[in-house]
Each structure stands twice: as C-alpha cells, then as structure tokens.
Amino acid sequence: MKQPSARGDVSALVLATIAATVESAQDGLARLGAVTRAAVAGTPDILHDDDLQLALFCLYELHYSGIDGAGDDWEWNPDLLRVRQCIEAAFEARVRDEVDLGDLPGTTSEAVCAELFRLTGDDSGPSMSRFVSKSASNDQLREFLVHKAVYQLKEADPHTFAIPRLTGRSKAALVEIQADEYGNGLPARMHSALFARTMRELGMDDTYGAYLDVTPAITLASNNLMSLFGLNRRLRGAIVGHLAAYEMTSSQPNRLYSRGFKRHGYGENATEYFDEHVEADAVHEQIAGRDMAGGLVEEDPRLLPDVLFGAAAGLAVDTLMTRHIMDAWESGGSSLRRSEAMAS
C-alpha cells in the first residue's frame, strides 16, 4: 500500500518513523510515545478521530501487505507495538461502551447460534442496502465502494489470523468459510478479485489503499476493529463472533446492493461480487453460527462473552459508519473526507 497522507501529529510521526530505519528513528520513536499518549487522552471520541484511526490502521498494515517505504523490521518493533497498544486500549474501551450484552445464553452450540441470530436480527440501524437498491446515484455507488474497499480488497485476511488460534470443529468451520472467500484455490474467484473487478467497471482505481486519504475515521475504525480482534489472541472469541455476525448479515444486503448496480445498467462484471455473496453467505451463516462460534464456545465456555462481544461490537461500529454515510447522503453531501478526490 502506498503511504497515505497524515491527518495529525500521531499519524505524521508514525508515517515518518516507519519510512526511516530503526536505527535512525530512535528520537522520533521517543517523541511518538508521548505524542500518542497525549492524543489518546485528549480525543473527544476515538471512533471519529482521523489522526488516531489512521495511525492505528497504518500500524496494523505492517502485519498485512505492508506500506511502501516501511521496512519489514518495523512489524515487531517493541517501541512501535507499545504505541499501537496505547491506541488499542482506548479504542477497545470505547467500543465496549457501545455494547450491552445483557443476559448470556447457554453454552451449547444451538444456544450460541440462536443468540447470534437474535443479535443480528435486532440490528435496527439505518439500511444502506435499501438505499443503494432504490435511490443511490452513480456517484454514491462509487462512494459506497470506497468505504467497502478498505476491507474488501483484502477480504478476508483479518479473520484468517484466527485459524491457528482455534482447534477442532471451530477451526474446521473457519477454514471452510475462508476457503470460499479465497476462491477455493482459483485466484480469479477470490472475493477480493471480484470486488476489484466491480471497482474497475465503475472506472475506479482498484489498487489497495488508493482511496485511503478520502476514507473517514469511522470507516477506518470499522476495519481496525477486525484487526484488533484478529491480531490479539486474547480476543480470538471476538474475531469469531465478528465473522459470525458478518456472515449472518450479508446475504440479503448483497442482494439489494446488486439491484442498485443493475438499476444503473451495470452488468455481471460489476454485480458478480454481490451475487456471489447472496448464495455463499446464506450457507456460511449456518456454518459460522453453529460450527464456528457455537463450536468454539462448546470447546471453551469461557469464551462465550467474547464471542458475543465481537458480534455486537461489529454491528455497533458498522451502524455508526452507516449512519455517517446515510446522514451525509440524505443532506445532499459526500460521506468522504474530500469528495473532489473521487473525480479522478
């Protein structure tokens, strides 16, 4: 990923640090820790903090495909990890404030699955899929793809971090789901490749990170949440719950998204990504709920709260992201940071 533009003191220092060598960046690292602590203490809301969310996104990206100009030895640098953990702690605490799990269900596979279906069924946030289906303009379709591209162009890497942390039934279920996401061995069928084709059909740049500079903090937060869960073993239950909720809320919205693109005259090259998820996720939701999430809790009942937290947290942050987008569209504005960048 090409290096994005900084959005404040923390992201500027992170980007400057990783562009240097570890040996030459010691003074910057020392200053980065203090600047980060001050920014975390002073932010009005970390979920909407462009500087901190971009900094965290870039720190996480070191564990994925990397950032142009950043040496591989930064990935496990202890000073940089301390900075990441400082932001993570505040981020996780803020997300937990959005979630109220209530009474916990039983720890059988069926009870866990039923609770996950209840959580996803109770989601009462604004419906972007219905708006896209019936009302979105062509420019809004392109904005919609910008928001989705942060994750979809690397689908489903954050959840894959959980594979070595699971065993038995839950591990087998996760691998089954992920195999579909990665095209069952066919590169052209990888869901990230199908999404990239959708972007090209709308005349957009399908390079990973191409639109990062216009992506708002809350969209980065939605993606950072997956990395938070996936990269911390203590939150392995949360990443499983997040994926379960993701699969359980995917099939019908993707049907509506496909209709929205067809309404504008786009053909299979643009809609196949969404059509693929209509069928695949209708199957995945059962595997994810019963075998992956339910199986994990049956193997280790202590993880039940984490599984439900991951599901509820994903739904809550995505609702905030959707509300941000819909509020902008309904007021006639753009949901992106700089809408003129979409003209290219």
Image (cartoon, rainbow, N blue to C red):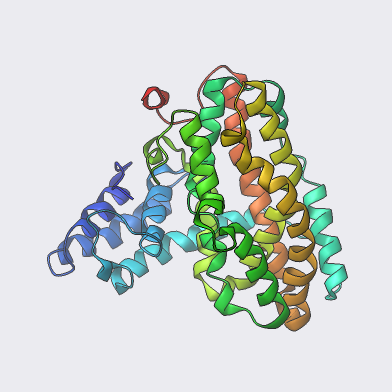
- Quadrant occupied by the C terminus: top left
Q: Kindly tell me whether residue 102 is visible in this rendering.
A: no
In front of the other: 319 or 3: 3
Residue 290 position, x and y percent, is 80, 68
Residue at 58% across, 31% down: 325
- The image shows residue 10, relative to residue 261, as above or below, that is below
Figure quadrant of residue 214:
top left
Q: Quadrant of residue 294?
A: bottom right
Q: Residue furthest top?
A: 332
- Residue 48 vertical placement versus 258 (above, below): below
- Residue 266 left/right relative to 131: left
Q: Horizontal and vertical percent for residue 21?
A: 16, 65
Question: Residue at point 52% right, 69% down?
Answer: 161
Question: Is 247 or 35 nearer to us in this picture?
Answer: 247
Residue 93 vs 291, above or below: the answer is above
Total count of labels: 0
State whether residue 135 appears in this view.
yes
Taking the image as shown, residue 237 lies to the left or right of residue 199, namely right
| Viewer-closest of 245 and 154 | 154
Question: Residue 11: x and y, percent?
Answer: 31, 49
Q: Residue at x 37, y 59 (%)?
A: 65
Residue positioned most to the left: 24
Q: Is residue 16 above or below residue 134?
A: below
Instruction: Residue 17: give x, y in percent of width and height.
Output: 22, 58
